[in-house]
Amino acid sequence: MEDLRNKYLELVSGAADEAALEELRVQAVGKKGEISLKMRELGKMTPEERQVMGPKLNALKDEINSALAAKKAALADAALDARLKTEWLDVTLPSRTRRQGSIHPISQVTEEVTAIFADMGFAVAEGPQIETDWYNFDALNIPGHHPARAEMDTFYTHRAEGDNRPPHVLRTHTSPVQIRTMEKTGAPIRIICPGRVYRADYDQTHTPMFHQVEGLALGKDISMANLKWVLEEFFSAFFGTHVETRFRASHFPFTEPSAEVDIQCSWEDGQVKVGEGNDWLEVLGSGMVHPKVLEAGGIDPNEYQGFAFGIGIDRLAMLKYGIPDLRAFFDSDLRWLRHYGFASLDQPTLHGGLAR
Ligand code: DAH
């Protein structure tokens, strides 16, 4: 009996898992287990022997059963401990913030500009960023010898040796889309064209790639007065306050007459505020479309006339959102993007509001 007891207590204490314990239980106290068989032998004993052996066997059975139960509980505890160790979480750590993407200020301002002009009946037109020099220059009344070509610091594509066609250019402005639209739809026209443009220039307010929005309105009796109203309407909607404008006589090859437009602003401690103060900031070029440009676009200048303008989108974004350096727009610095970016669900609309 003592041997049986030692054997099973040792086996139970060394059991590796629940399955091993179950096997031991069957082997010891199951129906045909070693101890159960011993209990059956009680019947063959004398009553005196039985009186001694009976309680002893019962006690042994109980002892083994409780050893099995205790070991089972211990195994379960150990399994739980092991699980808790791997699933451990330091709840005192600061929570992890979700890094969400944001809308770039250029995209945001482009959407704002588009919403305002759409409200005034302007559709969005597009053109290629790699242009022929005809669309980028000649058709806009900028012939080969014209100083504007040199002034614009144009990027030219490379032609293979022996290929004498004029090289393509990275468009230096969005104005070529005027010509493309005239060719495509004819007059009347009311479009804006936001997009990327390129010039070899780099400092705090210039990057080799930047953004413009072109405007073009052609009709039978469109005048400078319409241009002025449209632009004043635009600036007031865009900046969310009445903005005084100043039209200065200027010169562009593709317009006659031409005007540069300034908006009213104040400078304080190097900070510019639009819509107040006694200073002026130049923000766009504009004018009445030159008859030669209409002709280049296949439109009869005796029948149609209209205005055009070109605004720098990046400049608008810097002014409205107080962003001091243009170069940072294109550095892809995540800290900058998180600071100046916009929530992706804040779609600018005229009724929902344009500014954040
Ligand atoms: N294309 C000019 C530029 O990039 C801007 C401009 C001026 C566009 C006058 C126009 C315009 O449509 O009428 O500097």
Image (cartoon, rainbow, N blue to C red):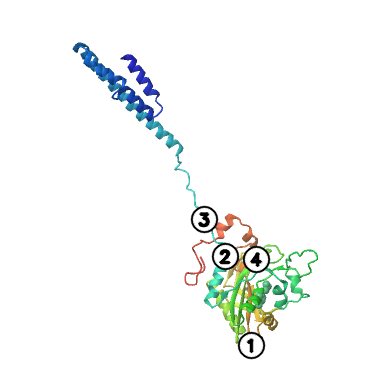
Question: Could you tell me which secondary element the residue under label 1 belongs to?
Answer: loop
Q: Position of residue 121 (x, y in %)?
A: 54, 78
Residue 107 numbered tag: 2
| Residue wearing tag 4 | 210
Between marks 1 and 3 in the image, the one whose residue lies nearer the viewer: 1
Image quarter of residue 280: bottom right
The amino acid marked with disc number 1 is Glu
Q: Whole-Å distance between the Cαs marked 2 and 4?
A: 12 Å
Between 200 and 316, which is closer to the camera in this rendering?
200
Q: Whole-Å distance between the Cαs marked 3 and 2?
A: 16 Å
Image quarter of residue 221: bottom right
Outermost residue toward the left?
47
- Label 4 CB-ligand 1 distance < 8 A: no
* Residue 198 left/right relative to 275: right
The amino acid marked with disc number 2 is Ser
Q: Are marks 1 and 3 in contact (CB under 8 Å)?
A: no
Between 147 and 162, which is closer to the camera in this rendering?
162
Query: Mark 1 or 4 closer to N-term?
Result: 4
Residue 303 numbered tag: 1
Residue 204 numbered tag: none
Q: Whole-Å distance between the Cαs marked 3 and 4?
A: 25 Å
* Residue 164 left/right relative to 30: right
Q: Whole-Å distance between the Cαs marked 1 and 2?
A: 37 Å
Q: Residues within 10 Å of mark 4 (few under 14, many from 20)?
A: many
